[in-house]
Image (cartoon, grey):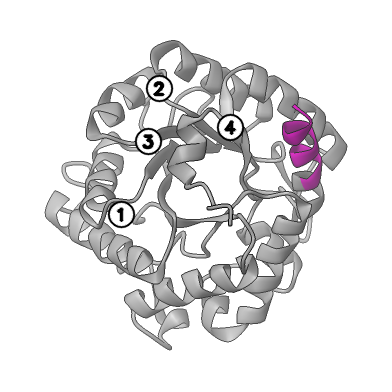
């Protein structure tokens, strides 16, 4: 019997891998009310979470993210009061595992920002932030993820705290991904070089770029990151800039075919794991996977 390679084995072996697409925008397309978190559906409509995972797997994903981006004690509100933060995270992992079955697809435990700034810019202490991240990371590890993904970060202090908590929760691989929503800077002014300088010494296994603004700006950030770090790069940009119509509905202009074609340059610029963030549908992901696996 052939033993399934671990995520770290594939990463260190230089394998190109495909992550999944967006969670929030796809769930909204499937009926999630605007302003309601996707995590609410982990309890209320778990079959939709599983279906989205399956759609991405069928499109070519080697990695799917748990629906736990905001599943921490700072952000988990009344709409997920059906259970504790720990239960929410464990259930989300279970749904991902149900979708994966026996397939050689990895489950990444998604850990997004806490929604509050750490002192002196905010009121949150480092100890409080660490405790919140550790609680979530432990639940994800106990649930059975293959790796932990600290994603959509913008502040070095918070990201460093999250990575330390993720490392303390077990021995799983840890990826840390920043969102450069000011071109090649985060909202806190952090560029890829400063991010790498702070995060690499913490022992992460890959650095990432996700969300942000345009595909062109994310590609610039990717190229900058590769000039300062030799670690594998996780790359999940949005499907272009969001466009909001008169009714408040959001759409993304980049087509699946366009995004798939652009993925070739992502790989040439150093991305090892490629996927998509906001606006990236299973159709977009299928075209990205076609490019990645065609290589």
Q: Are marks 1 and 2 in contact (CB under 8 Å)?
A: no
Instruction: Left or right? Give the position of 67 relative to 254.
Output: left
Vertical placement of residue 175 versus 188, above or below: below
Q: Which residues are magenta?
A: 286-295
Q: For mark 2, what is the residue?
A: 191
Q: For mark 1, what is the residue?
A: 116
Q: Are marks 2 and 3 in contact (CB under 8 Å)?
A: no
Name the residue: 67% across, 50% down.
Answer: 61
Q: Closer to us: mark 1 or mark 3?
A: 3
Q: Circle 4 sits in a helix, a strand or a loop, which is it?
A: loop
Location of residue 154 by image quarter: top left
Measure the alpha-carbon separation of dots 2 and 3: 19 Å
Instruction: Left or right? Give the position of 195 relative to 262.
Output: left
The percent position of residue 237, horizontal first and vertical second, equals: 62, 37
Q: Earlier in the sequence, mark 4 or mark 1?
A: 4
Measure the alpha-carbon separation of dots 4 and 2: 27 Å
Q: For mark 3, what is the residue?
A: 205
Q: How dense is the environment of label 3, judged by Cα within 10 Å: few (below 14), some, or many (20 and up)?
A: some
Q: For mark 4, what is the residue?
A: 15
Name the residue: 79% across, 31% down.
Answer: 294
Instruction: Left or right? Give the position of 99 relative to 133.
Output: right
């Amino acid at each position: 019997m052939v033993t399934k390679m671990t995520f770290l084995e594939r990463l260190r072996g230089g394998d190109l891998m495909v992550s999944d697409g967006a969670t929030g925008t796809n769930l909204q397309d499937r009926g999630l009310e605007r302003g309601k978190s996707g995590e609410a559906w982990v309890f209320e409509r778990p079959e939709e979470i599983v279906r989205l995972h399956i759609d991405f797997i069928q499109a070519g994903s080697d990695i799917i993210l748990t629906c736990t981006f905001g599943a921490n004690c700072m952000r988990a509100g009344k709409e997920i009061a059906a259970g504790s933060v720990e239960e929410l995270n464990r259930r989300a992992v279970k749904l991902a595992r149900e979708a994966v079955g026996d397939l050689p697809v990895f489950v990444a435990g998604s850990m997004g920002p806490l929604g509050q700034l750490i002192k002196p810019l905010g009121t949150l202490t480092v100890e409080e932030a660490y405790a919140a991240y550790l609680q979530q990371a432990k639940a994800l590890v106990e649930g059975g993820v293959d790796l932990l993904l600290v994603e959509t970060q913008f502040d070095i202090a918070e990201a460093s705290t999250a990575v330390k908590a993720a490392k303390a929760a077990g021995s799983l691989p840890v990826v840390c991904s920043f969102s450069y929503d000011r071109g090649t800077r985060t909202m806190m002014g952090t560029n890829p070089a400063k991010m790498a300088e702070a995060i690499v010494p913490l022992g992460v296994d890959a650095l990432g770029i996700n969300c942000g603004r345009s595909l062109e700006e994310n590609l610039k950030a990717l190229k900058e990151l590769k000039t300062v770090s030799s670690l594998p790069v996780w790359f999940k940009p949005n499907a272009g800039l969001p466009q909001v119509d008169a009714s408040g509905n959001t759409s993304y202009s980049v087509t699946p075919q366009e995004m798939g074609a652009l993925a070739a340059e992502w790989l040439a610029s150093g991305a090892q794991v490629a996927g998509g963030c906001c606006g990236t549908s299973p159709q977009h992901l299928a075209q990205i996977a076609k490019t990645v696996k065609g290589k």
